[in-house]
Amino acid sequence: MKITHIGGPTALISLGGLTILTDPAFDEPQEYVLPNGRVMTKLIGPALPAAELGPVDVVLLSHDEHKDNLDDAGRALLPSVPVVLSTPGAATRIPGARGLENWESVDLARPDGGVITVTGVPALHGPDGAEAVLGVVTGFVLTAEDLPTVYVSGDNASVDLVKQIADRFAPIDVAVLFAGAARTTLMDNAPLTLTSQAAAEAAHLLNPATIVPVHTEGWSHFSEGPDRLATTFEQAGLSDRLRLLTHGVATEVA
């Protein structure tokens, strides 16, 4: 299994002969003025433009309602992708997308005749009650008999939900955790994604998974970057399980 971190939540995963893209965000740095008048600021552009990806087999989209998870260039890419998996709500807004309820699974055909099973798993984009303000999000678990089991958290801030997922799918080999402790005054600055400390707690629950953090930088609303994450994992004795990726470089993780 290889992962190329493109930036923010966007990563290209090569697994079982399939090319899988998480939360496509390919716009250049800019400010987005939202319908409610709030502004989201993107600080860093993608390490690879969408045009250089090559064919993408599957998009795993944690949610479609926020520009840092699906921006204009990412949305333009979706019609060229055969399989787009997301929330049930996103499936009503994105032509051709399939929505997965929590714990619902779909099989993806592999070039070698096998399958990868993708299961939608619960995620909470902030504290209790966040869904009413920020919408429904989903994570994903990818399984196959002969491949690493991979957990993609999506924009999840709940360690309790990570425990449910870890208990159901153990052992998980690779966990792609959306961290960075995103914050907004809409939710009284409560973390909307995993803090570094929460990511370390999640890592303990996901033992022995290799932890690959994404979505820790590149936007003004993220409050804890890769350095903070690395320090927290070192203090927790987890440095050997943390893989901080260089943007744009395909890295073997399992």
Image (spheres, rainbow, N blue to C red):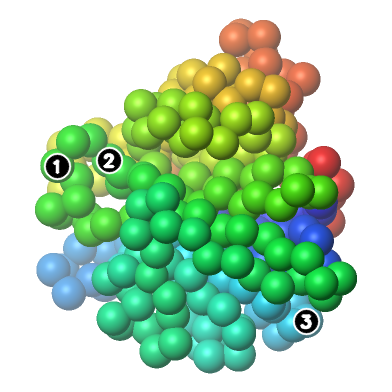
Between 186 and 220, the residue placed more toward the observer is: 186
Q: Amino acid at mark 2?
A: Gly
Disc nearer the start of the sequence (3/2): 3
Q: Quadrant of the C terminus?
A: top right
Q: Which residue is mark 2?
A: 126
Residue 140 shows up from this direction:
yes
Q: Quadrant of residue 71?
A: bottom left
The residue positioned 65% from the left and 30% from the top of the image is 171
Residue 89 placement (x, y as % from top left): 27, 71
Q: Is residue 207 left or right of residue 130?
A: right
Q: Which residue is mark 3?
A: 54
Count of marks overlaid on the render:
3
Mark identifier at residue 241: none
Q: Residues within 10 Å of mark 3 (few under 14, many from 20)?
A: few
Q: Amino acid at mark 3?
A: Gly
Question: What whole-number distance in Å separates the C-alpha atoms at marks 3 and 1?
Answer: 39 Å
SS type, badge 2: loop
Residue 111 placement (x, y as % from top left): 82, 75
